[in-house]
């Protein structure tokens, strides 16, 4: 499990230029994790439901937060239909 903690949480203050660079790295890391989860979802949709499942991808890519994307990825293991999977993110 990856845990990201802000240095400010520990009272560490970086010079403004370093803080900006560090913040950029954190954002980059989060975006990389998001892309990895989306790739896993894409693979799962294709494997479980084929083209019908992949039609959900444009909706899923717009989901705003990583915990919801992770929930979709996990529910993909047991969802019986694409519509059942859709309910997990539409109801949240």
Image (cartoon, rainbow, N blue to C red):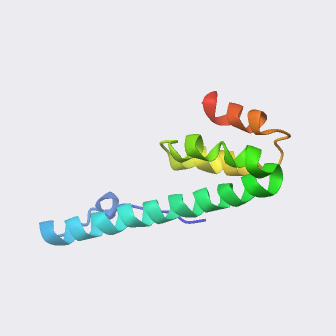
Instruction: Residue 7: give x, y in percent of width and height.
Output: 32, 64
- Residue at the extreme top: 91
**In the rendered image of this protein, does residue 51 appear above or below residue 25?**
above
Q: Residue furthest front?
A: 51
Instruction: Please give the name of the residue rendered at 29% of the width and 65% of the height, measured from the top-left corner.
Output: 24
**Percent of width and height locating residue 89:** 63, 35
Q: Quadrant of the C terminus?
A: top right
Q: Quadrant of residue 1?
A: bottom right
Picture mark count: 0
Up the image or down, 8 lies above or below 17; here it is above
Residue 9 in picture, x, y percent from top left: 34, 58
Q: Nearer the viewer, residue 11 or 88?
A: 88
Asked whether 92 or 38 is in front, the reply is 38
Question: Residue 2 appears in which quarter of the rendering?
Answer: bottom right
Decide which of 11, 82 is in the foreground and name it. 82
Q: Residue at x 50, y 45 (%)?
A: 65
Front-lying residue, 15 or 64: 64
Residue 15 appears in the rendering: no
Relative vertical location of residue 39 with respect to residue 69 in this rendering, above or below: below
Asked if one can make out residue 78 in the rendered structure from this viewpoint, the answer is yes
Instruction: Give residue 81's position: percent from left, percent from top.
Output: 82, 38
Residue at position x 50%, y 43% in the image: 62
């Amino acid at each position: 499990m990856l845990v990201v903690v802000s240095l400010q949480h520990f009272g560490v203050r970086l010079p403004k230029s370093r803080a900006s660079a560090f913040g950029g790295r954190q954002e980059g890391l989060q975006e990389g994790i998001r892309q990895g989860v989306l790739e896993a979802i894409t693979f799962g949709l294709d494997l479980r439901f084929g083209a019908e499942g992949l039609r959900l991808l444009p909706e899923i890519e717009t989901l705003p937060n990583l915990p919801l994307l992770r929930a979709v990825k996990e529910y993909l293991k047991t969802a019986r239909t694409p519509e059942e999977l859709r309910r997990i993110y539409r109801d949240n």
